[in-house]
Amino acid sequence: MNAAVFHASGRPLEVTQVPTPTPSAGEALIRVAGCGMCHTDLHYIDHGVKPFKTPPLILGHEVAGVVEAVGSGVTGRAPGDRVLIPAVLSCGRCGYCRQGRENLCERLVMLGNNIDGGYAEFVAVPADDLVTVPPELLLEQACVIADAVATPYHAVTRRGRVRPGQWVAVVGCGGVGLNVVQCAAAAGGQVVALDLNDDRLALARRLGATHTVNPKAFPRPDKRVREITGGGADVAFEAVGAPATIQAAYGLLKRGGRLCVIGYSAEEVTLSAARLMYYELEVVGCLGCGAGEYPEIMSLVAAGKIQLDPIVSGTIPLDCINEGMDRLRRGEGVRWVVTP
């Protein structure tokens, strides 16, 4: 099969022929219809972050497709099924899985990190993890639900715990941040979106933000957010993954507010412990999404309460994946999808 293979940081992905995987017992072989491109992949390709599996490795963790074949012992799945592969695969047996927190599984496996991912024609994964995609959704769009939608949904509903009428600040309007905007709006939050790109802010309004703030126009974005909200955000989400933006999001909170960090940063971040104590603030992290949340997300997408059309900027053939990575580097579009 054709696949885009990662060999080392500083090198482009190699599009080449590799053996088609054979599904083991309990696995399903998925013919990939689309795989969303994520900035996480640039951490490996450009910035020297090491994946858990030693390269060569097939990247790509936002995958939707059709079941091609199943291994022995698989029930409930058959060739022809339209499915989504969660970005985080769980064992289903450990204490965290039994609590419904599969994203914290002790044996957690990340697609395109621990195991080969979806920048390929086929991928083999545990059949029990697969999520049914409703027939009305395009697989080439539904793939981004695996992370770009699922992680924001988990952040808004489980970690940030947004309630109707609360003021919500979203720092960073990339693919993840924009989906935080629409998930928070769907939860009844009043959303203030912050970004340096006016086009992204316009899209944030289309997706449900009631207000937008560009720090280029407001050198004190924290002051502007306090003016809009009447004192600060009940919940702030950081969706960039940089110390400066984590600190900025922390500074947007009102008394008793909650910061949810979604963006990944390997750097140390300093936050005021005095402010944390005196204002009874909360700081929480967010990783992926629990298995039980995917049906909720699919229902919201099917009902039009979460939109995919504005998020998926277009498709890119697998042979042109490195051109797609250049688009990510330049900040073009929101979410590009690789099609084999």
Image (spheres, helix red, strand yellow):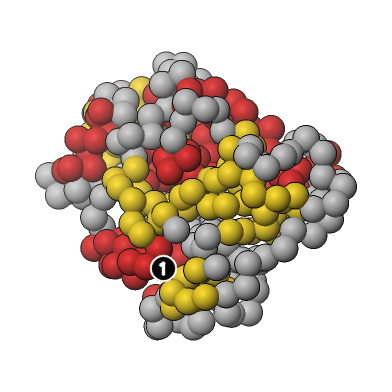
Residue 98 placement: quadrant: top right
The picture quadrant where one finds residue 338 is: bottom left
Residue 19 spot, x, y in % from top left: 62, 73
**Residue at image point 52% right, 27% down:** 135
Amino acid type, label 1: Leu
Using residue 332 as the reference point, say whether residue 238 is left or right of it. right
**Position of 182 compared to 295: left or right?**
left
Could you say where residue 287 lies in the image, as x and y percent from the top left?
Answer: 59, 49
Taking depth in this image into account, of 270 and 113 the one nearest to the observer is 113
| The C terminus lies in quadrant | bottom left
Extreme residue in the left direction: 217
Nearest the viewer among 270 and 292 is 292
Instruction: Name above or below for residue 47 compared with residue 163.
Output: below
Where residue 196 sits: x, y (%)?
21, 50
Classify the position of the N terminus by image quarter. bottom right
Asked whether the viewer can see residue 322, the reply is yes
Q: Is residue 248 left or right of residue 63?
A: left
State which quadrant residue 294 falls in. top right
Between 285 and 50, the one lying in front of the other is: 50
Query: Image height check: is 142 above or below 182?
Result: below
Q: Nearer the viewer, residue 31 or 229?
A: 31
Q: Is residue 28 above or below residue 268?
A: above
Residue at 51% x, 82% y is 7
Q: Please give the name of the residue rendered at 23% of the width and 42% of the height, measured from the top-left corner.
A: 200
Camera sees residue 232: no
Pointer 1 local density, CA inside 10 Å: few below 14, some 14–19, many at least 20: some
SS at circle 1: helix
Q: Which residue is mark 1?
A: 42
- Residue 274 at what x, y percent from top left? 50, 48
Q: Total number of numbered labels?
A: 1
Residue in the picture at 26% in, 50% down = 333
